[in-house]
Amino acid sequence: MRQASAHDPEKLQTFRTGIMRQASAHDPEKLQTFRTGIMRQTNGTIMSVNHAQRVDLEVVADLIPAQSRVLDVGSGDGLLLELLQATKQVDGRGMELSQRGVNECVARGLSVIQGDADKDLKFYPDKGFDFVVLSQTLQATRNPKLVLDELLRIGTHAIVSFPNFGHWRVRLSLFVEGRMPVTKDLPYSWYDTPNIHFCTIRDFVNLCEELGATVEKATALDANGQKIGLSMPWWFWNFFGQQAVFLLKR
Amino acid sequence: MVALRTKRTNNEADEPSSPVLRFGADKPLKLDAGTLLSPFQIAYKTYGTLNDARSNAILVCHALTGDQHVASTNPVTGKPGWWEVLIGPGKIIDTSRFFVICSNVIGGCLGSTGPASTNPATGKPYGLDLPIITIRDMVRAQLMLVDHFGIEKLFSVLGGSMGGMQVLQWASSYPERVFSALPIATGARHSSQNIAFHEVGRQAVMADPDWHGGKYFEQGKRPEKGLAVARMAAHITYLSEAALHRKFGRNLQDREALTFGFDADFQIESYLRHQGMTFVDRFDANSYLYMTRAMDYFDLAADHGGRLADAFAGTRTRFCLVSFTSDWLFPTEESRSVVHALNAAGASVSFVEIETDRGHDAFLLDEPELFAAINGFIASAARARGLSA
């Protein structure tokens, strides 16, 4: 797998067509439970700095093979960990900023601690996990570069999902209204948003390159949570992708 | 009356009303102080039934002034067991499912060998002739009890405060014997401030003329005033400013106005005096010295070259730590540093901080969030251990 480079569109295209397809051997019943869970979670208030549909979790779960050791950073109310334990028998651990989220997770039998991605990742040993997941949290960290660096240190692989600030709705809001976007999926005003470090898909690919990370797989999801075709050109992803999921390693 | 009380507690020390396991000269207890304690005995209580696989045993470790009567009426006070809110048939720790063991720690005064026990060499109570006991000594003795039951691996070890220290010691010393560990409101070391509070308590005991250099039983006396003051001071540290204010405020005790004297004008004074007085009825003063010293000496990192993570290297034990926001004796940061060490050791760890104004003592109280965490942790550990519901 080649490393993606934002500076070379051709290379990018090659890397993306090389993205492996998800071998979706889903148990339909569990998937349904998971989807119901997503709805529940969307209605809840604890987790997710975005109230966006958490369809990215499904994509994330697909990337993780059975029996892996997984650390979910920003594990919210534990939906992903629960899914992974039920369907993949992973050895799953979580870290979550909200104490309420943590307490709910532990009460449900998940192995979760209260912690801050910006401060507490340093306590984990090198390559202690097969996968470290950071789902919809990167943009809320104080130092995304450092956090990403830590993820790559702790995990053999890192999986990162984030909202794409290059999405056309965001661009439209800025372009037409001249105002910071407030959408269904990014419902905060500029002054009260926990999302302090937005990036576009292209920005993220740049950062990966800077950190010497290899993009093993990437997926962009449109507003309906559907994967955007792999054959679509890069600018299309950055324009229509509402969120992106990256599998990285270093 | 005093004499009667003295006699009763003393009897409980040698001939407790709970089962006792006695170890003779062939099985001494190796102490950190560098000596052997022999003969010695462990008084304990069990609840529930050990299953055929001996895989459903839970060891409960008691706190500073606790005892083995965790889930049944205390023979000295006549009060319910100290953790009956949590442990019993149908409770969170369900004794119809688990085999619960709780023993009086070495150095205690309710039947395990302690300063109030008779020294076989002299025929008199040990007093200060008993070597200093450490948390690790207590755990070594508990291991001998667990061995006695033929239990290879405890399903869980849990406890709060000094009990939590024992849990951490268990997980560190005998990781292969502990499937899951639940240290609550505790830390991997006793802080300077905590040592300071304990020292105040000990000095209060030793300043009481009835203490007699620790040989008060021989004088037919007990340093009740000193021990009561020690308890009063300690009791403040188990609560929180907010809880004290909520409960007592500046309310006056059975009076309309200040008396311009040193009577217990305020409810809080009356409350503390009551706490002190009832405590001396059930606890031995020398034992209080030994227990506080054991906590002061506890420093798990120091035993591992200053690196706490090394105390848990390679552990397969599942951990769940719990702290309380208003606990200023073992603040959340103490638990968090254990969590960080466990993270560094690659351990499976959960950590819950519970919001409450009830202070350190919250772990003994009816705290729904605490119960939810323990319930979730125990249930998932039981699944992992293959224990049926």
Image (cartoon, rainbow, N blue to C red):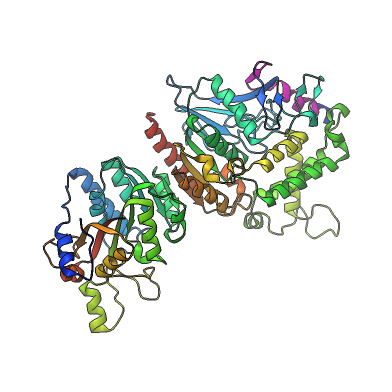
Residue drawn at x 61%, y 25% as measured from the top left = B44
Check the image and report above or below for B163 versus B5.
below
Q: Residue B360: x percent and y percent?
A: 61, 48
Quarter of the image for the N terminus of chain B: give it. Answer: top right
Residue B14 among those drawn in magenta: yes
Residue B367 seen in the figure: no
Residue drawn at x 25%, y 44% as measured from the top left = A65
Residue drawn at x 80%, y 52% as measured from the top left = B264
Residue B107 among those drawn in magenta: no
Quarter of the image for the C terminus of chain B: give it. Answer: top left
Q: Nearer the viewer, residue A249 or B387?
A: A249
Which quadrant holds residue A1? Answer: bottom left
Apparent side of residue B379 relative to residue A202 in the rendered image (left or right): right
Apparent side of residue B286 relative to residue B173 in the rendered image (left or right): right
Q: Nearer the viewer, residue B133 or A5?
A: A5
Residue A157 seen in the figure: yes
Residue drawn at x 79%, y 32% as measured from the top left = B128
Q: Residue B160: x percent and y percent?
A: 58, 41
Apparent side of residue B248 relative to residue B174 in the rendered image (left or right): right
Q: Residue B83: x percent and y percent?
A: 57, 36
Total numbered labels: 0
Q: Residue B384: x percent and y percent?
A: 38, 34
- Which region shows up in magenta? B5-26
Q: Nearer the viewer, residue B85 or B206?
A: B206
